Image (tube, grey):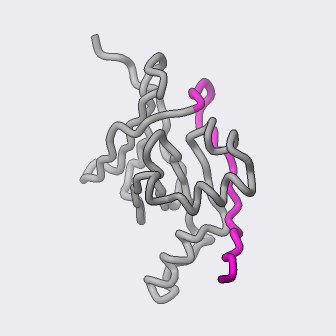
Amino acid sequence: MNKIIFNEEWSRWEPISGLADKYCLVSVVSDEDGFKVILEDDKGIGPNVSIFFKDYVWSYRNVDENFRIKIIGDLLEKYGSSFYGQWTFFTVKESDYFNWLSEQSHEIFNANQFIHFSIVACDDILDIVSCYEPEVTFLEEIT
């Protein structure tokens, strides 16, 4: 069996300063107000993080990491375990997800107009395709 070459180029995305290394996915909401992701610090000591796309996003998928073993192995081989194991926020170029979207849309999808964000959370990998960067903020704790 021939090994498929991993061509994706992953980069650490730091949308705001002061982020913890690792977050867990709390919620994903897509409604008339936009697309919102809430993440919780995996140690439970920092504030939650909101990622908000004020309009819709073109595509997203959330998959339990147990079903993304291939990408985890590819990242491990190409970048090492600390790259994805000690950070949550990434952008991806030469994206296989983009290739799939292009194929599914009969090549209407043009990757040059979009950004692939990948949130590698504690137990989930959330991929988001948008044409702009979201608003990322820390959420105040409600007492």
Q: Position of residue 48 (x, y in %)?
A: 42, 27
Q: Residue furthest front?
A: 1
Does 15 appear above or below 8? above
Which residue shows up at 59% across the image and 31% down it? Answer: 21
On the rendered image, what quadrant is the C terminus found in?
top left
In the displayed structure image, the side of residue 64 where residue 29 appears, left or right: left
Q: Is residue 39 magenta?
A: no
Residue nearer the viewer, 62 or 19? 62
Q: Position of residue 22 (x, y in %)?
A: 54, 33
On the rendered image, what quadrant is the N terminus found in?
bottom right
Q: Position of residue 78 (x, y in %)?
A: 74, 57
In the displayed structure image, the side of residue 77 where residue 107 appears, left or right: left
Q: Residue furthest top?
A: 143
Span of residues in magenta: 1-21
Does 36 appear above or below 5? above
Q: Residue furthest bottom?
A: 106
Magenta segment, principal secondary structure? Answer: loop
Displayed quadrant of residue 47: top left
Which residue shows up at 48% across the image and 19% down it? Answer: 46
Q: Is residue 4 magenta?
A: yes
Which residue shows up at 49% across the image and 37% down it? Answer: 136
Q: Position of residue 111 (x, y in %)?
A: 59, 72
Displayed quadrant of residue 2: bottom right
